[in-house]
Image (cartoon, grey):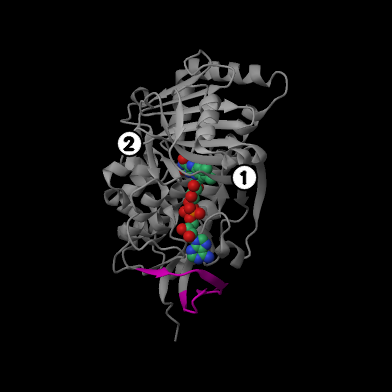
């Protein structure tokens, strides 16, 4: 007799992407009969405590729709998301209101905002909260091993528990253990850059605008928060980041004031700081029979355009769409883990992610380039873009996740 696996789908990693994916699977009518397991090593037991969360993400319009479909948007307290209406990007040799600075406004796109700044721990909590359901079994444990067999996969946890699933989805982040268990290599290129993050109070209002000033070693960004403060992401050399990290708050505030050219007045640091080494990474294979990758487990992108988790949420929505379409076309639950089905997802998302990774990498190179002529090229490029509203609009719609080969749940809500 044929063995029936314990679960139809096991998701390894309940971060922002994995937890949202569980909610999407749960809410997809064509997949309503699937039994889902979610494995998370650091499962939060309660909502995040009040106080500063250093890790925040700019969440796109498309991601809002995906989170809404997953049930996570409803679980996210309104006070925990800060809508921003505008974005200003400029080169260190210029001013934010100069001709060669870029200015994006939600009103020019007919959108209510350009997106939201949300703390990562709240986003993860809301997505996990939406999965608390009889069809999703959560394992608060670390994945240890995966064995991929023809008809199912065997999964072992660090605490000794073992079970089987028809399909394993690796959503366990950039150093993915599931990816290694499946024998999939990632091509990784470390940037000689580190991102310092901290939270600040500023002399002038952020005006619900995201501000980003490009300097030779990398950009400094101010992301607006609801309480009037801003989250800082300062990309610089690893050596400089180490110096900044070692500074007293007052000295760091003065350094940020200078690096931002006083755009929001005097800056006061109000939290601890942390630093993240940056890398460009992507896997060649997004899937194997009975196994597929989503989110940072499949790709890491430079944070300058705030796209990482947004791409991961697109992966999640696209994968759910591919699985649902396979079911509509008559595939059995068992067939969902077959390579022929998963390849459709791989072709789709690899093309989209490769384009996004390449574009952001090119921007980082252009803005960090110290060669004579590069500064002129930057300024001319920005000025030209600013004067070409259709090109600017299409670039912005892509950044908002509303253009390109987007999943139908992103389109339908539009
Ligand atoms: C400085 C900085 C700023 C950024 N800003 C933005 C931004 O503004 N907008 C944006 O879209 N992106 C941004 N990103 C990128 C974003 O943070 C990542 O793309 C996102 O965290 C990826 O989500 P994920 O769920 O795929 O992986 P992760 O967030 O890494 O989650 C993986 C989850 O898997 C769990 N896990 C790992 N190993 C195991 C295991 N063995 N067993 C069980 N569970 C496991 C982890 O506990 C974790 O919960 C930024 C990144 C950096 C460094």
Observer-nearest of 411 and 154: 154
3D distance between C-alphas at marks 2 and 1: 31 Å
Mark 2 lies on a secondary structure that is: loop
- Magenta span: chief secondary structure: strand
Q: Is residue 25 left or right of residue 305?
A: left
Specify few, some or many for label 2: CA neighbours under 10 Å numbering under 14, 14-19, or 20 or more. some
Where is residue 370, by image quadrant? top right
Q: Is residue 4 left or right of residue 233?
A: left
Q: Quadrant of the C terminus?
A: top left
Tell me the residue at 32%/52% (across/down): 72
Whole-percent x and y of residue 342?
51, 59
**Residue 190 in sight here:** yes
Whole-percent x and y of residue 22?
38, 60
Q: Which residue is tagged 1?
A: 280
Where is residue 174, by image quadrant? bottom right
Where is residue 235, by image quadrant? top right
- The magenta stretch spans which residues? 137-164
Q: Which residue is tagged 2?
A: 226
For residue 254, above or below residue 129:
above
């Amino acid at each position: 007799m044929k063995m029936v696996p314990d679960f139809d789908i096991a998701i390894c990693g309940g971060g922002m992407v994995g937890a949202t994916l569980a909610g999407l699977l749960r809410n997809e009518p064509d997949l309503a009969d699937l039994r889902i397991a979610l494995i998370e090593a650091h499962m939060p037991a309660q909502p995040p405590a009040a106080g500063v969360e250093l890790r925040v993400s700019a969440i796109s319009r498309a991601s809002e729709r995906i989170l809404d479909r997953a049930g996570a948007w409803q679980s996210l307290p309104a006070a925990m998301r800060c809508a921003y209406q505008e974005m200003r990007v400029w080169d260190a040799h210029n001013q934010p209101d100069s001709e060669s600075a870029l200015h994006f406004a939600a009103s020019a796109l007919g959108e209510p905002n350009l997106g939201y700044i949300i703390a990562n721990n709240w986003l993860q909590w809301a997505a996990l909260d939406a999965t608390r359901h009889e069809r999703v079994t959560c394992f608060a444990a670390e994945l240890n091993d995966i064995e991929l067999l023809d008809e199912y996969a065997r999964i072992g946890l660090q605490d000794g528990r073992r079970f089987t699933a028809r399909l394993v989805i690796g959503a366990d982040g950039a150093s993915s253990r599931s990816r290694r268990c499946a024998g999939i290599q990632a091509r990784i290129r470390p940037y000689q850059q580190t991102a310092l993050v901290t939270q600040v109070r500023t002399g002038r209002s952020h005006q619900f605008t995201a501000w980003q000033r490009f300097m030779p070693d990398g950009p400094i960004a101010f992301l607006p928060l609801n309480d009037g403060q801003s989250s800082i992401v300062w990309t610089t050399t690893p050596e400089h980041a180490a110096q900044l990290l070692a500074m007293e708050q007052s000295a760091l505030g003065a350094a940020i004031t200078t690096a931002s050219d006083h755009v929001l007045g005097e800056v006061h640091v109000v939290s601890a700081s942390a630093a993240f080494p940056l890398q460009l990474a992507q896997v060649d294979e997004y899937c194997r029979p009975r196994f597929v990758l989503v989110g940072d487990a499949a790709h890491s992108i430079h944070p300058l355009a705030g796209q990482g988790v947004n791409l991961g949420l697109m992966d999640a929505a696209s994968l759910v769409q591919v699985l649902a379409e396979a079911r509509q076309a008559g595939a059995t639950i068992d067939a969902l883990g077959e390579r022929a089905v998963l390849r459709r997802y791989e072709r789709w998302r690899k093309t989209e992610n490769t384009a996004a990774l390449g574009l952001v990498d090119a921007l980082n190179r252009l803005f960090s380039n110290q060669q004579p002529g590069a500064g002129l090229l930057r300024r001319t490029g920005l000025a030209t873009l600013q004067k070409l509203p259709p090109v600017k609009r299409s670039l912005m719609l892509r950044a908002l996740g509303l253009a390109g080969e987007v999943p139908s749940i992103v389109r339908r809500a539009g």
